[in-house]
């Protein structure tokens, strides 16, 4: 009996010891990001397993913080990993840019790593690398909404020569990417929501201009949809957009709300404004599109789902980002030269709004070769590279002078005609709510999604959302 | 085992003069046993107790994931935020004269929105559901209705998939256990769905469930005259779970069949011969010979599948994303959305407890014991 007790006791002791050791090592891995080795964290008990444990657990923490690394010498072979997106032609273009960089720098191997399409899942991949302080990723493609939330994991690119070129980029984006004086990301391309419309169908049904208001869009979409279905295309829909419960819905819904004079969820000076008549009205209106002018499945659509319907010639209107333009003109598209883009419609009495999107390149603080990685990031975001991306993939440059470039304008004429849309795009409230933007956005898109799928009306959804945001952010509520 | 049984035996003869000598030997043996146990213990601690312990520790804090922000010990607050439920009576709307307001169109009593009766301090309760009882109307409020829903969905998913997989798996196992031409081939083909990685098969099914007539099921349903070919299977709340169950049953039935096939092959064929001689029909043989002898295998297979199904993650995360959660995908998205390490750790501990309860229930019910 005694022995059994002893064994149990010993077991318990070891578990406890492990717990303490493990938690001690685990609880504050990032608190001293630079130069401190956690050697002083002695395991509490001398049990063998414990020591084994510590050995198992230490390597990531022991990883030399990046900043002090020697820059790669001329001859040294190094590998850089770029974590990039894969929406439309993104990945192919990034790979081509990597090839060009490797040609110019033969000692560097650049691996382009594909990351998930859904923004939230991509963030998940990044966060896991950051939590482990992993040197696995060197250059990260980051969303326009992330600099505030993720700044602590990136180097200040100003220290690596970005200061000289920052002036060429749009001021607003540079400002967005600057956190406490540090430039955490170099702008790569910018985005704004656009309305794609079928020029041939508008003409066929006697409309001479794209819709200026959402109500007009509703009427035009209904007319065209009815006509096309009568002619036999049962798969035809009036309007496709992004209605899944994800960041993309935050973008779409912000455009509806803002274009109806309903504000931007949280105002730049920190007032929760979402619970207002204008916002409620327009979101209820949008819920009415589901299963009338938009497919019932639109509440599960992301960008690429919408584009699939549109590019097969099965939609009269689409809300999407500029990247869909060059793909719509590609050889495998059913709608080459049959569409154009315009600013999104507005609510009654409001003015059109396009959500500001776009992606930046940031260099991880945990990279083993930050100098070379920063060089790569600046190369990929340089004017020459942005021009190639603009021509081949209709990705909007972030460098103002490229909007006067003739080759760029020939490939994507709307860059010129819609210049104002890009420069006046509405930002999501990521700066004012940082570091809680993601939670804010999740609450918002879940509320809107529950209205779209008919769980509740916008009045109830936004009343609840307002309370949630008050609890989360601690801000006052008010009118937009 | 021997290390334990030796000392217990000699303890029964206390104060014997020989005790000391045996005890020395026993002690030495005991020590050796502990030394030999150490590698196993180490592995167990590294891969089981350490992660579990650290999750539990984190669940008591407000730690942020991938952030240098200081974390604090907050006791069980994460758990109460996850699981608090409250039932409140909803009073009907009353007009100025004190009369109950009745909707003139439907003749039903008007109730105010549930937000107005659910408490907000110290934690906000959100509406989970409403129900009527004895003419009164009640609201169930939850501090995190999404998690409560995730628990419900996951348990429903588990019960239905495991039941279907067992029945179908047993059928398939009986078929490929009988002798016919091409049996070896059949056994290999049977395993194909199981061999495909979930990430791939989930995508495949996602396309088959597409909301337009680009999707297989919409075409099928339309050809059968059941719909107009526009059912959004993955968005419509009534279809989401059935779709998930279909994918999982397709994918995991082969695994069940494989386990049961192994069990069937353990049954000696002379039992069937004897049954034949006794004049028992095939059905009788199944109930009286096959099923009882298959019970231990069936129990193991059920435990495997149930515990696996409760922690389902990949399927939900890939196909439904944030439209609907399983418990595990809920924990994942809380970790990503708000970098809420503490909160999602608490959710993980709840999953652990639920799995634990299921495991114990099974062991009790099916008698999966060594002794």
Image: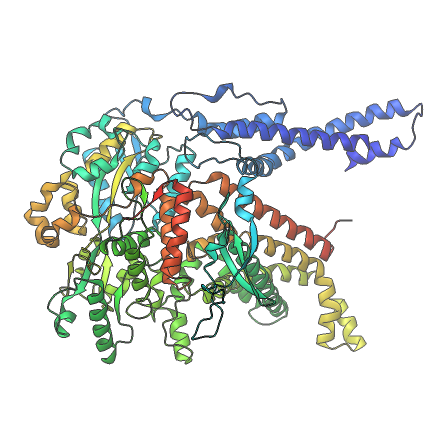
The front one of A145 and A272 is: A272
The front one of A324 and B265 is: A324
- Quick check: A226 above or below A406? below
- Quick check: A133 above or below A320? above
Which residue is at a point 35% across and 42% down the rendered structure image?
A476
Residue B239, can we see it? yes
Which residue is at a point 30% across and 35% down the rendered structure image?
A80
Q: In which quarter of the image is the N terminus of chain B?
A: top right
The front one of A170 and A404 is: A170
Query: Whole-percent x and y of residue B210?
Result: 37, 66
Left/right of residue B118 with respect to residue A72 in the rendered view: right
- Quick check: B75 above or below B288? above
Quadrant of the rendered image containing residue A82: top left
Query: Whole-percent x and y of residue A67?
Result: 32, 24
The residue furthest right is B16
Left/right of residue A479 with respect to residue A45 in the rendered view: left
Total count of labels: 0
Query: Whole-percent x and y of residue A213?
Result: 19, 62
The front one of B288 and A231 is: A231
Residue A381, can we see it? no
């Amino acid at each position: 009996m005694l022995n059994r007790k002893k064994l149990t006791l010993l077991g318990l002791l070891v578990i406890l010891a492990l717990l303490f050791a493990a938690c001690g090592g685990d609880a504050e891995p990032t608190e001293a990001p630079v130069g401190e080795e956690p050697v002083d964290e002695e395991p509490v008990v001398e049990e063998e397993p414990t020591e084994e444990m510590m050995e198992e657990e230490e390597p990531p923490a022991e990883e030399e913080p990046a900043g002090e690394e020697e820059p790669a010498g001329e001859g040294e072979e190094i590998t850089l990993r770029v974590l990039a997106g894969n929406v439309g032609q993104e990945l192919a273009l990034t790979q081509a840019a990597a090839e060009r960089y490797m040609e110019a720098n033969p000692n560097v191997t650049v691996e382009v790593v594909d990351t998930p399409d859904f923004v939230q899942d991509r963030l998940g991949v990044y966060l896991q690398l950051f939590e482990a302080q992993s040197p696995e990723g060197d250059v990260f493609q980051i969303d326009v909404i992330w600099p505030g939330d993720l700044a602590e994991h990136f180097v200040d690119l100003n220290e690596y020569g970005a200061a000289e070129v920052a002036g060429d980029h749009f001021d607003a984006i540079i400002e967005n990417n600057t956190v406490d004086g540090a430039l955490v990301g170099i702008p790569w391309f910018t985005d704004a929501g656009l309305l794609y419309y079928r020029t041939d169908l508008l003409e066929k049904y006697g409309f001479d201009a794209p819709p200026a208001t959402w109500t007009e869009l509703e009427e035009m979409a209904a007319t065209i949809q009815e006509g096309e279905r009568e002619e036999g295309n049962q798969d035809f829909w009036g309007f496709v957009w992004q209605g899944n419960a994800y960041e993309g819905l935050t973008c779409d819904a912000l455009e509806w709300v803002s274009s109806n004079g309903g504000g931007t969820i949280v105002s730049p000076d920190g007032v929760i404004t979402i619970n207002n008549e204008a916002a409620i009205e327009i979101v209820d209106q949008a819920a009415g599109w589901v299963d009338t002018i938009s497919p019932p499945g639109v509440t599960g659509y992301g960008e690429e789902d919408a584009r699939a319907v549109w590019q097969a010639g099965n939609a009269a209107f689409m809300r999407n980002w500029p990247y869909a333009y060059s793909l719509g003109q590609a050889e495998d598209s059913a709608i080459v030269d049959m569409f154009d883009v315009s600013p999104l419609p507005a609510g009654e009495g409001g003015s059109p709004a396009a959500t500001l999107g776009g992606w930046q390149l940031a260099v991880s603080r945990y990279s083993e070769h930050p100098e070379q990685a920063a060089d790569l990031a600046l190369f990929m975001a340089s004017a020459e590279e942005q021009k190639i991306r603009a021509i081949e993939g209709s990705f909007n440059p972030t460098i103002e002078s490229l909007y006067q470039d003739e080759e760029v304008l020939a490939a994507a004429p709307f860059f010129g005609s819609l210049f104002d849309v890009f420069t006046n795009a509405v930002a999501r409230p990521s700066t004012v709510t940082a570091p809680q933007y993601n939670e804010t956005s999740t609450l918002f898109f879940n509320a809107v999604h529950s209205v779209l799928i008919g769980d509740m009306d916008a009045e109830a959804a936004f009343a609840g959302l307002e309370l949630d945001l008050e609890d989360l952010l601690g801000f006052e509520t008010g009118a937009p | 085992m021997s290390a334990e049984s030796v000392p217990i035996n000699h303890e029964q003869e206390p104060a014997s003069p020989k005790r000391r000598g045996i005890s020395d030997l026993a002690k030495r043996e005991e020590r050796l046993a502990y030394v030999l146990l150490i590698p196993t213990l180490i592995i167990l601690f590294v891969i089981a107790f350490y992660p579990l312990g650290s999750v539990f520790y984190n669940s008591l804090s407000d730690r942020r994931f991938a952030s240098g922000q200081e974390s604090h010990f907050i006791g069980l607050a994460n758990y109460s935020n996850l699981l608090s439920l409250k039932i409140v009576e909803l009073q009907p709307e009353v007009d100025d004269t004190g009369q109950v307001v009745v909707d003139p169109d439907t003749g039903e009593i008007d109730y105010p929105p549930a937000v107005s009766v659910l408490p907000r301090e110290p934690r906000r309760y959100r509406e989970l559901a409403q129900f009527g009882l004895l003419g009164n109307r009640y609201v169930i409020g939850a501090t995190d209705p999404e998690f409560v829903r995730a628990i419900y969905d996951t348990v429903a998913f588990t019960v239905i998939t495991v039941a279907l997989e067992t029945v179908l798996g047993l059928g398939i196992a009986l078929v490929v256990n009988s002798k016919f031409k091409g049996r070896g081939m059949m056994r290999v083909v049977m395993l194909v769905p199981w061999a495909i990685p979930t990430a791939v098969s989930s995508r495949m099914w996602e396309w088959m469930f597409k909301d337009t007539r680009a999707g297989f099921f919409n075409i099928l349903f339309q050809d059968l005259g059941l719909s107009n070919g526009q059912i959004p299977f993955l968005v419509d709340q009534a279809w989401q779970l059935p779709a998930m169950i279909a994918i999982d049953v397709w994918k995991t039935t082969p695994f069940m069949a494989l386990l049961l096939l192994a069990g069937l092959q353990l049954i000696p064929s002379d039992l069937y011969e004897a049954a034949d001689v006794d004049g028992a029909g095939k059905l009788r043989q199944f109930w009286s010979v096959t099923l009882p002898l298959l019970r231990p295998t069936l129990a193991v297979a059920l435990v495997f599948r149930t515990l696996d199904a409760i922690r389902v993650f990949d399927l939900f995360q890939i196909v439904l994303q944030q439209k609907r959660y399983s418990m595990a995908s809920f924990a994942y998205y809380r970790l990503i959305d708000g970098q809420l390490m503490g909160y999602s750790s608490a959710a993980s501990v709840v999953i652990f407890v639920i799995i634990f309860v299921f495991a114990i229930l099974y062991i009790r019910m099916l008698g999966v014991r060594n002794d």
